Image (cartoon, rainbow, N blue to C red):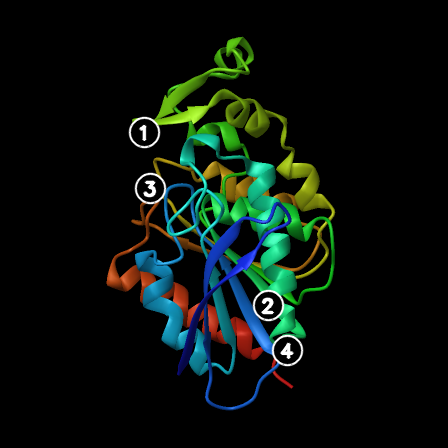
């Protein structure tokens, strides 16, 4: 497996830290992974899956959103729509490396971002989504929709002890991922832990019932939100491996 660490610029000119892991044999197939809200491109789950994905003959691109990891913006200024723009820029960058057959993969908030981007273009093969929040406000247990409406848009509030701009919370309320899902006809594979206390399991059911294309659903009955146990990672990876093989020549 070959590994390349580098940065590329998003549309705002902000450098985003990135990594591409590649198979030894030539390939035009790729998976691009979007990490969760407070995670990074070096998250435990995707790190544990990297070699397996590459062994299937796929390049794997992971990157830090503008407000995460080694990228340079302040987490306080996080924006869902900026993460959407970051993923679009990452896709453009990935294609410069010869990727013609692309799969969008994401975990938690990164899955939501991947879902949103997938609703706006169709130049990809499939979606691979883990613990996807459809109702984005559910990831903020500290606030009700009414609480969000009352927030000063120029102020900030704490989420999991981290100061976040209030525009982010208002943005999450305005994003309609059910509508996005209904517009996606490409195939998707979904994973969710039934004991997820961060993104309740009902989100999985909503997504399953609204995606317009073929959907494969896998539930880990005793799985939590993180799904980082070795058996969780092995379960997910086994099904991803089978899924990707469907798209081989």
Query: Total marks drawn?
Result: 4
Label of residue 160 in the image = 1
**Residue that label 3 marks:** 195
Pick out the residue farthest to the bottom.
Answer: 25
| Quadrant into which the N terminus falls | bottom left
Give the CA distance from mark 4 to mark 1: 39 Å
With 211 as the anchor, is 154 left or right in this view? left
Is 122 rendered above or below residue 226?
Answer: below
Give the image location of residue 181, x and y in percent. 66, 45
Answer above or below: position of 87 versus 194: below
Q: Residues within 10 Å of mark 2 (few under 14, many from 20)?
A: many
Q: Quadrant of the C terminus?
A: bottom right
Task: Look at the numbered discs 4 and 2 and tell me whether their residues touch, using CB distance below 8 Å.
Answer: no
Question: Distance between the Cα atoms at labels 2 and 1?
Answer: 32 Å
The CA distance from mark 4 to mark 2 is 7 Å
Query: Which mark, residue 94?
Result: 2
User: What residue sits right under mark 4 in the picture?
Assistant: 98
x%, y% of residue 28?
62, 80
Q: Is residue 190 visible?
A: no
Q: Which mark is residue 14?
A: none
């Amino acid at each position: 497996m070959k590994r390349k660490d580098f940065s590329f610029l998003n549309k705002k000119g902000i450098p985003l830290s990135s990594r591409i892991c590649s198979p030894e044999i030539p390939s035009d197939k790729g998976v691009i992974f979007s990490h969760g809200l407070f995670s990074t491109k070096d998250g435990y789950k995707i790190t544990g899956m990297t070699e397996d994905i590459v062994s299937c003959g796929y390049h794997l691109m992971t990157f830090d959103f503008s407000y995460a990891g080694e990228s340079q913006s302040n987490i306080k200024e996080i924006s869902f729509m900026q993460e959407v723009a970051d993923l679009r820029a990452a896709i453009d960058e990935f294609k410069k490396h010869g990727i013609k057959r692309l799969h969008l993969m994401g975990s938690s908030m990164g899955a939501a971002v991947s879902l949103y981007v997938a609703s706006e273009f169709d130049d990809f093969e499939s979606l691979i989504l883990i613990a996807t929040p459809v109702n984005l406000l559910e990831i903020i247990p500290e606030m009700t929709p009414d609480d969000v409406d009352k927030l000063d848009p120029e102020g900030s509030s704490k989420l999991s002890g981290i100061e976040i701009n209030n525009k982010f919370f208002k943005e999450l309320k305005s994003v309609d991922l059910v509508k996005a899902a209904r517009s996606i006809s490409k195939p998707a594979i979904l994973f969710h832990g039934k004991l997820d206390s961060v993104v309740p399991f009902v989100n999985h059911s909503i997504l399953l019932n609204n995606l317009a294309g073929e959907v494969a659903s896998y539930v880990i009955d005793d799985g939590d939100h993180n799904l980082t146990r070795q058996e969780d990672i092995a379960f997910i990876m086994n099904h991803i491996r089978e899924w990707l093989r469907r798209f081989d020549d």
